[in-house]
Amino acid sequence: MRLEARPRTRGLNPVTSEARARSEATLQGGDNRGDKLRILVADDHDVVRRGLRVLLEGQPGWEVCGEASTGREALDLVRRLKPDVVVLDVNLPELSGLDVAREVVRSLPQTEVLILTMDESPQMMRDLLRAGVRGYVFKSDVGGDLLQAVEALGRHRHFFTSKVAEMMYQDYVKSPPAVGAGESLTARQHEVIRLLALGKTNKEVASALGISVKTAEAHRKNIMSRLKLKAFSELVRYAVREGIIEE
């Protein structure tokens, strides 16, 4: 499915009355969420939101619990609805997608942020990944990757398309972070890095290595501190650069 964003116009492109009604109905519905994967869509183009809703709600057990056309509306709905995943455009009026992502990652860690954008700026990507975003898909790749990305983030695993991963790798090669402490990592820490970079959760790392979840969490914290890494994406890039996993 290919989503065509119409030309932007000045001022706000408000969410449609139908979409607003759906969001308000969800807000009034209490906590009757069941086992559905709850997704919020934030994009300032009506046609994009409608297309995403059709695509996402075509998956069994998934529901779009709300829609937003501005950054402030997106942040307000995320705080109230607490969705599992927010599909977020970068270029939103009132409040940028970057600012929304930062706040969601900071204050609502159980809500995963999936960036869906046409912006292929390396700097924007760098800023979003440093903000803690764990999913990144270009709108040109929607048909092949969006559903996989939402499913991965719904399981609290990161997802980057091959195009995004290549851009991350090239950016890392050109300007790698000054870690300087990789040589002092233990064999066990290298194994933890490998499993984490492959998308394993702390629980799965603990099971694979025969250690407690608390110990796995401690390893992860110590590794991030030792390597002076602030975002999980930097750990993935470190693992690729050091040959711990293949790109």
Image (cartoon, helix red, strand yellow):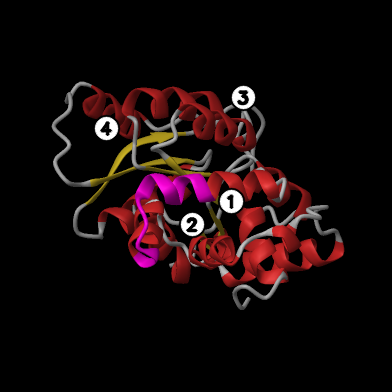
The residue wearing badge 1 is 232
Q: The residue under label 2 is which amino acid type?
A: His
Cβ–Cβ under 8 Å for marks 1 and 3: no
Instruction: Give the magenta-colored segment's residue range.
Output: 208-219
- Which numbered disc flags the more N-terminal residue, 4 or 2? 4
- Identify the residue at horizontal 44%, vertical 35% (top origin): 109
Q: Quadrant of the C terminus?
A: bottom right
Query: Quick one: SS at disc 3?
Result: loop
Q: Position of residue 245 (x, y in %)?
A: 59, 74
Q: The residue under label 1 is which amino acid type?
A: Phe
- Which numbered disc flags the more N-terminal residue, 1 or 3? 3
Tell me which corner region of the image, top left, top right, bottom left or bottom right, holds residue 160.
Answer: bottom right
Cβ–Cβ under 8 Å for marks 2 and 1: yes
Would you say 120 lies left or right of 159 here?
right
Residue most toward the bottom?
246
Cβ–Cβ under 8 Å for marks 1 and 4: no
The residue wearing badge 3 is 94
In 3D space, how far apart are the residues under numbered discs 3 and 2 (Cα atoms)? 28 Å
Closer to us: mark 3 or mark 2?
2
The residue wearing badge 4 is 22
Closer to us: mark 1 or mark 3?
1
- Which numbered disc flags the more N-terminal residue, 1 or 4? 4
In 3D space, how far apart are the residues under numbered discs 4 and 2 (Cα atoms)? 29 Å
Would you say 23 lies left or right of 140 here?
left
Q: Position of residue 202 (x, y in %)?
A: 41, 52
Cβ–Cβ under 8 Å for marks 4 and 3: no
The residue wearing badge 2 is 158
Image vertical order of residue 132 relative to residue 245, above or below: above
